[in-house]
Amino acid sequence: MKYKIEIEREGCISCGTCYSIDPTHFEPDDEGRSTVVGGETDDNLSSGVFEDEEIEVAREAEDSCPTSVITVTEEKSSKVEPK
């Protein structure tokens, strides 16, 4: 199962809650704003896709974010079934 983690960085207040709870998926940038570990990041969004058993910890970080800028969603399979 794959999961996508996204952070709407404009709303991030650099509190550090997410990367304190889950340093496997979240880390601070040079300004202290949260980014997704190994993900793609710009000024507005940081996102990455993970396939791991520790996604529940990322969900805890999502639930703990005081500005609700983190989303953890299940990735839909893009496999095309043969006819």
Image (cartoon, grey):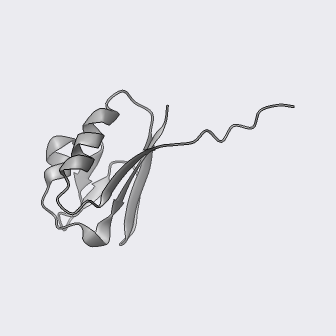
* Displayed quadrant of residue 40: bottom left
Residue found at x 49% / y 31%: 1
Residue found at x 21% / y 65%: 30
Q: Is residue 4 left or right of residue 60?
A: right
Query: Nearest the camera: 72 or 9?
Result: 72
Residue found at x 40% / y 30%: 52
Q: Is residue 43 left or right of residue 79?
A: left
Q: Is residue 43 left or right of residue 78?
A: left
Q: Residue furthest top?
A: 53
Query: Nearest the camera: 51 or 67?
Result: 67
> Considering only vertical position in the picture, is 3 above or below 12?
above
**Number of marks in the rendered image:** 0
Is residue 68 visible in the rendered structure shown here? yes
Residue 53 screen position, x and y as percent: 36, 27
Residue 45 screen position, x and y as percent: 39, 65
> Considering only vertical position in the picture, is 1 above or below 70?
above
Is residue 24 visible in the rendered structure shown here? no
* Displayed quadrant of residue 29: bottom left
Residue 83 screen position, x and y as percent: 87, 31
Residue found at x 77% / y 33%: 81
Residue 68 screen position, x and y as percent: 26, 59
Query: Nearest the camera: 78 or 39?
Result: 78
Q: Residue furthest right?
A: 83
